Amino acid sequence: MNAAKNFYLCVTAAGVVVFLFYCLRINFFPTGMSLSDAIFFLLVIFSFSLLMGFAFTGWYSVSCILVWVFLKVSLFICRITKRTKSKFYRNAKGSYRTARKMSLFEPMFALIIVSILIGVFVAKLVLDGKLQIIPVISSFLLVAVGILLIANVNFEKLLTREKKRKMTVAFVGFMVFIFLLFSGMGEILNDSAMRVIGVKKNDATFLLKDNDLEMARHLTGNSGQSFFYGDVLFTGVGDTSLLVINDKRLIVKNVNLTISF
């Protein structure tokens, strides 16, 4: 019972963190919310975790292929240069065998398919200007380094099983950190998660009233306008929403707002 309660609290806390990260990014904190809105925070972390799981699987697949190519090429070069007695060759060979035992490269066909899919996805984001090519490539390489270190640590015979487990967990944490903060995918996943649960909406139509209507008309310069068009950065929870009208941000009361999207 305590384990279930602790899991619930941890998941809710993670949802709060993801939500606060989004609020900091848009520079807006809705009024009328409290930590008692547990269902909302659970939806936040569920949608974010689901999207991150799909995206990180792609990053992992590409990085695994990079590690496989690196080890294969390294072993081949050592063999043709007759350096099979070097420490580097022994470490590379041991890391490759350990990786095979840990099934890091299996099934290779699935890794290739996922890598192609994530490649197309990332290429589209780069072309749309949502990702930068240098951070993306660097993150792939750094995640590959993490995978290589995991294989190398588990190959090392001088380390205890508990030590290997702790170091493996640390390297996995490093890989997730690099993926979220270094590649640029963290913000994209954050926005997508909020869009999935209905907090963020693009290309929406607004109907406002009272003082919020007057302010919106002031932003557009049209005193007779009734309907407004733009993006919703935050809505659905709390007492206020954040809209973008005519490239200006407008905080409105939810009771004065009707959205069509």
Image: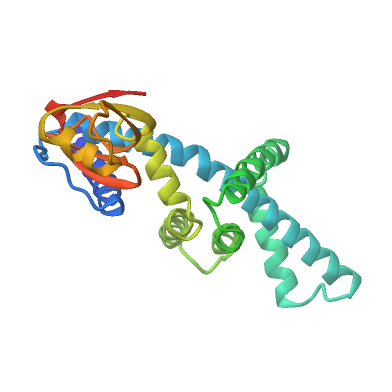
| Residue 14 seen from this side | no
All told, the count of numbered labels is 0
* Most foreground residue, 220 or 56: 220
* Most foreground residue, 18 or 4: 18
Q: Is residue 131 left or right of residue 119?
A: left
| Residue 39 seen from this side | yes
What residue do we see at 12% from left, 34% from top? 239
What residue do we see at 71% from left, 41% from top? 112
x, y percentage for residue 161? 46, 58
Please, is residue 200 above or below residue 261 in the view? below
Q: Is residue 110 left or right of residue 77?
A: left
Q: Is residue 71 left or right of residue 15?
A: right
What residue do we see at 49% from left, 66% from top? 159
Quarter holding the C terminus?
Answer: top left
x, y percentage for residue 175? 48, 57
Q: Is residue 35 left or right of residue 145?
A: left
- Quarter of the image for residue 152 reads bottom right
What residue do we see at 19% from left, 42% from top? 251
* Most foreground residue, 136 or 160: 136
x, y percentage for residue 236? 22, 29
* Most foreground residue, 230 or 216: 216
x, y percentage for residue 241? 20, 37
Quarter holding the N terminus?
Answer: top left
Please, is residue 196 above or below residue 35 in the view? above
What scheme was used to colour the molecule?
rainbow
